Image (tube, helix red, strand yellow):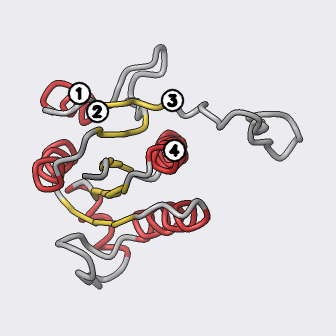
């Protein structure tokens, strides 16, 4: 039996760091990854308004949502480069609930997610509510990856001024 990882992602630097970590871990363990992108209910309204209601359901019950497609496409490229087995899933609704539903469906050995933070709390880092709910309710170990994580030997991302994070 091969190891299986569940990677929960959204459109954020932390999710991309979690994707890099999950792909590296899967390569090392010869594991497969199921990557799930959940579009929150509120984002569906914004997407429907912006796209005049053009939804498709190519993979599960998730809507056509450009950030979800972009993030999943990036993960597909990472997995392909590292020769890691990957399945992608798009869902919509309550993020924590849908991630936990996917965990029940897939039965992963580990759930990997980015340290999504609540943007309403500028004075200190506070986990997004969906991350906290997954941590509290998951029946598998959960690995939370900070946005700042980089593979060993890699350089930090450089901003437009040539300095890290600028």
Q: Are marks 3 and 4 in contact (CB under 8 Å)?
A: no
Q: Nearer the viewer, mark 4 or mark 1?
A: 4
Instruction: Return the residue found at the far right.
Output: 162
Q: Residue 35: horizontal and vertical position, in percent?
A: 35, 57
Q: Which residue is mark 1?
A: 135
* Residue under the point 39% across and 30% down: 144
Q: Mark 1: few, some, or many residues within 10 Å (few <14, many ≥20)?
A: some
Q: Is residue 26 above or below residue 59?
A: above
Q: Earlier in the sequence, mark 4 or mark 1?
A: 4
Between marks 4 and 2, how big is the CA–CA gap?
25 Å
Q: Which residue is mark 3?
A: 146
Q: Is residue 57 above or below residue 82?
A: below
Between marks 2 and 1, how big is the CA–CA gap?
6 Å
Q: Secondary structure at mark 3?
A: loop
Q: Which mark is residue 145?
A: none
Q: Secondary structure at mark 2?
A: helix
Q: Residue 85: horizontal and vertical position, in percent?
A: 41, 64
Q: Mark 4: few, some, or many residues within 10 Å (few <14, many ≥20)?
A: few
Between marks 4 and 1, how big is the CA–CA gap?
24 Å
Q: Which residue is mark 4?
A: 28
Q: Mark 3: few, some, or many residues within 10 Å (few <14, many ≥20)?
A: some
* Residue under the point 61% across and 64% down: 81
Q: Which residue is mark 2?
A: 131
* Residue under the point 26% across and 73% down: 63
Q: Are marks 2 and 1 in contact (CB under 8 Å)?
A: yes
């Amino acid at each position: 039996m091969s190891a299986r990882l569940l990677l929960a992602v959204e459109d954020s630097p932390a999710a991309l760091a979690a994707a890099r970590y999950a792909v590296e871990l899967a390569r090392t363990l010869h594991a497969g990854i199921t990557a799930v992108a959940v579009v929150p209910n509120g984002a569906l309204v914004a997407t429907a308004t912006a796209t005049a209601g053009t939804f498709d359901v190519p993979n599960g019950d998730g809507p056509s949502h450009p950030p979800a497609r972009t993030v999943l496409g990036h993960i597909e490229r990472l997995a392909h480069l590292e020769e890691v087995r990957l399945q992608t899933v798009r869902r919509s609704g309550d993020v924590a609930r849908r991630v936990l539903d996917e965990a029940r469906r897939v039965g992963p050995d580990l759930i990997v997610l980015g340290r999504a933070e609540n943007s309403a709390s500028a004075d200190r880092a506070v986990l997004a509510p969906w991350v906290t709910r997954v941590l509290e309710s998951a029946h598998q170990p959960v690995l939370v990856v900070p946005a700042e994580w980089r593979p060993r030997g890699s350089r930090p991302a450089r901003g437009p001024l040539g300095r890290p994070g600028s």
